[in-house]
């Protein structure tokens, strides 16, 4: 089983636990179509989709969702949320930074026309 199918399987576990549908977490019809394509029809799961799911289910560990490591749900500690992996957070921030840079280049290219 490839990594996308493993992530898709974990997303399905989250969906069953929280009883959400693509329609219930989508902000608009385009997002709903994207979610449907990615989750139900084998499309590549994008960072936007992962972030949307993590936003809708904040107790779900990004570590578990992406890598299958640790527990599905964060555990409370004396200082707040516990099992958060800094390496995963760093990777997310790096991906977001790259995406922002790509968007800036695209906006610059479009403004030249």
Image (cartoon, rainbow, N blue to C red):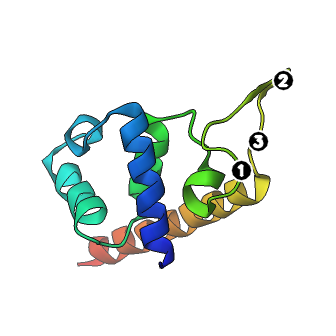
Disc ID at residue 70: 1
User: Which mark is first along the chain, 3 or 1?
Assistant: 1
Q: Where is residue 22 in the image (x, y as percent from the top left)?
A: 24, 45
Residue, x 84% and y 23% (percent of image)? 79
Quadrant (top left/top right/bottom left/bottom right) for the C terminus: bottom left
Q: Do the residues labelled 1 and 3 touch (CB within 8 Å)?
A: yes
Q: Which of 19 and 112 is in front in this view?
A: 19
Residue 59 lies in quadrant: top right
Residue 51 lies left or right of residue 88; in this view the side is left
Task: Confirm or deny contact between disc 2 and disc 3 (CB under 8 A).
Answer: no
Q: Name the residue under label 3.
A: 83
Q: Which residue is more in the foreground, 49 or 82?
A: 82
Splitting the image into 4 quarters, where does residue 45 fall? bottom left
For the residues marked 1 and 3, what is the alpha-carbon distance in whole angstroms? 7 Å
**Which callout, 2 or 1, points at the residue further toward the start of the chain?**
1
Q: Where is 83 relative to 35, above or below?
A: above
Label 2 residue SS: loop
Answer left or right for 29 relative to 105.
left
Task: Give how far apart the Cα atoms at labels 2 and 1 are.
Answer: 19 Å
CA distance for labels 2 and 3: 12 Å
Crowd tier of the residue under label 2, counting other residues whose Cα lies within 10 Å: few below 14, some 14–19, many 20 or above = few
- Kindly identify the residue that appears in the image at 43 percent across and 35 percent down: 17
Element assignment for label 1: loop
Q: Is residue 14 above or below residue 102?
A: above
Q: In this view, does 62 lie above or below 99?
A: above
Residue located beneath label 2 in the image: 79
């Amino acid at each position: 089983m490839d990594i996308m199918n493993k992530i898709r399987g974990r997303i399905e576990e989250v969906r069953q636990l929280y009883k959400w549908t693509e329609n219930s977490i989508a902000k608009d019809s385009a997002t709903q179509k994207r979610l449907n394509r990615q989750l139900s029809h084998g499309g590549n799961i994008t960072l936007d989709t992962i972030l949307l799911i993590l936003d809708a289910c904040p107790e779900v560990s990004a570590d578990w969702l992406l890598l299958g490591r640790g527990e599905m749900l964060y555990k409370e500690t004396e200082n707040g949320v516990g099992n958060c992996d800094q390496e995963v957070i760093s990777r997310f921030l790096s991906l977001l930074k790259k995406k922002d840079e790509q968007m800036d280049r695209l906006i610059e290219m479009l403004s030249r026309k």
